Image (cartoon, grey):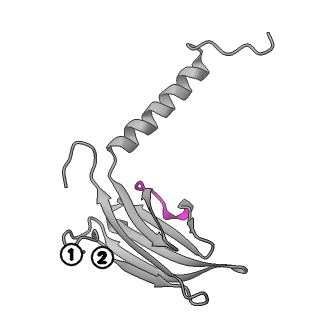
Amino acid sequence: MPGRRPAIDSPTHCCRWLAAALVVAFSAHAETLVCHLSYGGETRSLEALPVDSPYAVPVHAIGSYFLFRMVFQKDPPDLAAIKLYVFANRDNGPLPIHQATHCYPPATGGGAGYGFTGRNRVYEPIRDGELEYWCELSPPAGRTP
């Protein structure tokens, strides 16, 4: 019949529901990288979960000039790190202007209220603007920092 919806107990519906539930359950319990960014009078937070490979991690546009990338890799242990990148969004492609690497797990208490990174400032080489950021780890659900 046209316009007929699949039954709630259909295999397709059950698989979609299960997949959605697993994503919500995993992200609710996973340790999360949270970066707080301020640029052009706007402040916002970005989150990243651990990844197996850094190659598919996206960039986030911050205003019209900056691109921000957060790579949170816990495994394998010899590659465990948190890497933060800032790019200038140029007409001929992204230009790296800042990169910071932090060991995982990061040292705690060194940022004087600004997480494990401390407060970072990155300046636009052309427009004279400033991006300010700092990052922290949010512990898994049920654990206190």
Identify the residue position indicated by label 2 in the image: 118
- In the image, is residue 106 above or below residue 3? below
Q: Position of residue 50 (x, y in %)?
A: 40, 55
How many marks are shown on the rendered structure? 2
Crowdedness near tag 1: few (<14), some (14–19) or many (≥20) residues, C-alpha within 10 Å = few
Q: Position of residue 111 (x, y in %)?
A: 24, 74
- In the image, is residue 127 above or below residue 87? below
The N terminus lies in quadrant: top right
Magenta: main secondary structure equals loop
Do we see residue 123 in this rendering?
yes
**What amino acid type should be assigned to the residue bearing mark 1?**
Gly
Segment colored magenta: 48-55
- Magenta segment includes 46: no
The single residue placed furthest to the top in the displayed view is: 1
Is residue 37 toward the left or the right of residue 5 in the image? Answer: left
Secondary element at tag 2: loop
Q: For the point 42% across and 37% down, which residue is it? A: 24
Q: Position of residue 114 (x, y in %)?
A: 28, 71
- Magenta segment includes 49: yes
Q: For the point 44% across and 72% down, which residue is it? A: 84
Q: For the point 39% across and 64% down, which residue is it? A: 35
Sequence order check, earlier mark of 2 and 1: 1
Is residue 14 toward the left or the right of residue 7 in the image? Answer: left
Q: Quadrant of residue 91?
A: bottom right
Q: Position of residue 27 (x, y in %)?
A: 39, 44
Labelled pair 2, 1 in contact (Cβ < 8 Å) = yes
Do we see residue 75 in this rendering?
no
Give the label on residue 141, or none: none
Crowdedness near tag 2: few (<14), some (14–19) or many (≥20) residues, C-alpha within 10 Å = some
Give the label on residue 110, or none: 1
